[in-house]
Amino acid sequence: NDMIFEYPERPSQQDWSKYYPAYFRPPTSSKETKRPLSPSSDSEQQPKRGPASPGSDQQPTRVEFADIGCGYGGLLVALSPLFPNTLMVGMEIRTKLVNYLQQRIEALREFQHELKKSPAAEWVDVQAKLDKEIADLSKPLETEESLDNGETDRLVPGHYENISAMRINCQKYLPNFFEKGQLTKIFVLFADPHFKRRKHKARIITSTLLAEYAYVMRVGGIFYMITDVKDLYDWNVKHLDDFPLFERIPDEELEHDPAIPCVVHSTEEGKKVARNKGKKYLACYRRIEDPAD
Ligand code: SAM
């Protein structure tokens, strides 16, 4: 039911403060503000601090990475310390998973604060407490998902304010959340295969959706795709190859990309595939210039 999805009419109306409280102030209501009412600015929030993107001091802080169908969020937790100044969002259609991931991130944020206060000797205790809390969070999900993290989150102090999770059907509302050219990375990792022909429209990579991904991506941005299902890989690669605004990145170039090890190894689904000794098929594409722009 679409009614239960919350989405802004346009990106400037999205309140990011509940997702990244360290980065955004809640929007001020027109009653509180002393400035004269201006229709374009009163719904827009001011970034608390920034800038998020190196080299672009003028730009306001904004989300730059999106993990589409993020599941339990292993990618975000791994990327957070690698890109400490970048805001990243996990987008997931299933309420239970979004709730789990929000609590997981909340726990990581709280424990890092605790860590700051306590001396180094207590590090092990803090990590153990975190492990237990996160294991407890995932317990209700285990029976239906056979979730087995293998290892728990390694706490890296000073991080996790830059990651968050939201509930969204990414087939429908993506351009409501992101401006044209806003995202520098999109991840579609181990997406549901939807084998049956009549289910193909539920796939996350289609020509229609690629047009939306290309719209919200900056030129030079990277689209990451990995799956263990050869059929789906072929489908995805065909659609990406055929799409004029994406260009395949040669594998040799990917060796230098610090995000790749996380893409391959850090998600819960990727770990499951590795446990079952499955094969992983990776393809990455660069968003190229639109001659019409
Ligand atoms: N990327 C994660 C990983 O690698 O562990 C999760 C992979 S899981 C097989 C695919 C996820 O995509 C599921 O959690 C599913 O709920 C989510 N999903 C499927 N269709 C979606 C949609 N239209 N919008 C958002 N999420 C979706």
Image: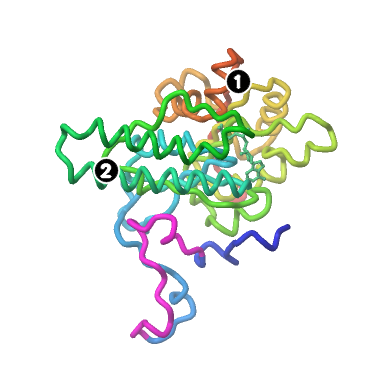
| Circle 2: element type | loop
Residue linked to disc 1: 281
Q: Main secondary structure of the magenta part?
A: loop
Q: Position of residue 225 (x, y in %)?
A: 58, 30
Residue 218 rendering spot, x and y as whole percentages: 50, 46
Q: What is the x, y in percent for residue 237?
A: 67, 27
Residue 264 in the figure: left or right of residue 209: left
Q: Quadrant of residue 285?
A: top right
Q: Position of residue 135 (x, y in %)?
A: 45, 35
Ligand 1, by image quadrant, is top right
Q: Which mark is residue 12?
A: none
Which residue corresponds to mark 2? 158
State which quadrant residue 204 falls in.
Answer: top right
- Mark 1 and mark 2 lie on one chain; the one further toward the N terminus is 2
Position above or below: 188 against 52: above
Q: Is mark 1 within 8 Å of ligand 1?
A: no
**Camera-side mark, 1 or 2:** 2
Query: Which amino acid, mark 2?
Result: Gly
Magenta stretch, residue numbers: 14-35
Measure the C-alpha gap from mark 1 to mark 2.
33 Å
Residue 57 vs residue 154, the one in the foreground:
154
* Residue 28 magenta-highlighted: yes
Indicate left or right for 270 with 170 as reference: left
Judging depth in this view, the residue of 290 and 102 nearest the camera is: 102
User: Which residue is pictured at 72% across the width and 38% down the height?
Assistant: 203
- Residue at coordinates 19% horizontally, 34% vertically from top-left? 122
- Residue type at mark 1: give it: Tyr
Local SS, label 1: strand
**Residue drawn at point x = 63 percent, y = 48 percent:** 170
Q: Relative to 239, does residue 97 appear above or below in the rendering?
A: below
Residue 152 among those drawn in magenta? no
